[in-house]
Amino acid sequence: MSFKRRKKQIITKLKEIGAIFTLFAMKTNMVFATEGGTSIGTAEVETATENIKRVITSIAMPLGGVLIFASVVIAAIKMIANSNNPQKRAESIGSLAWICGGGVVLGASLIIAGIIINIATNNTGSLLGG
């Protein structure tokens, strides 16, 4: 009985040692920036902010609008299909609240993204303090 216990202890210790060596092997070296190193220029910042603005205005807003519209249409169809069943009709009406909540979250996220971009770039295209 003690041989099995001792064997388990040895296996456990070997696993711990193996985990420690694995962590040391995966440890990355730290690299610190030096004087005169490369930095992000104004052109890169302007390009990045324009790309973010373009993605928000050309993809997020229309996609969100289409999803909200489709959700309202589906909820309306469910209400029409379940017009004789008050329980299912109430569930369909309840889904409208979730759709409104999703629209509010989408709108708030777009507003917050715009605020963050304007604060980070001071609405000039270059980072503050840069």
Image (tube, grey):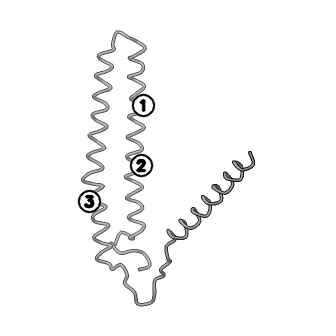
Q: Position of residue 1 (x, y in %)?
A: 74, 45
Q: Disc 1 and disc 3: Cα gap in Å?
A: 30 Å
The disc, 1 or 2, on the residue closer to the chain's N-terminal end is 1
Q: Position of residue 45 (x, y in %)?
A: 33, 73
- For label 1, the residue is 97
Q: Is residue 69 above or below residue 38?
A: above
- For label 2, the residue is 108
Between 120 and 47, the one nearer to me in the picture: 47
Q: Disc 2 and disc 3: Cα gap in Å?
A: 18 Å
Q: Disc 1 and disc 2: Cα gap in Å?
A: 16 Å
* Residue at the extreme right: 2
Q: Do tag 1 and tag 2 residues touch (Cβ < 8 Å)?
A: no
- For label 3, the residue is 54
The amino acid beneath tag 1 is Ala
The amino acid beneath tag 2 is Ala
Crowd around label 1: few <14 · some 14–19 · many ≥20 (10 Å) = few
Helix, strand or loop at label 1? It is helix
Crowd around label 3: few <14 · some 14–19 · many ≥20 (10 Å) = few
Between 38 and 5, the one nearer to me in the picture: 5
Which residue occupies 26% across, 40% down? Answer: 66
Which residue occupies 39% across, 57% down? Answer: 113
In the picture, residue 78 is in which quadrant? Answer: top left
* Residue at the extreme top: 84
The amino acid beneath tag 3 is Arg
In the picture, residue 82 is in which quadrant? Answer: top left
Which residue occupies 40% across, 51% down? Answer: 109
Q: Position of residue 117 (x, y in %)?
A: 38, 64
* Residue at the extreme bottom: 36
Q: Is residue 66 left or right of residue 38?
A: left
Q: Do tag 2 and tag 3 residues touch (Cβ < 8 Å)?
A: no
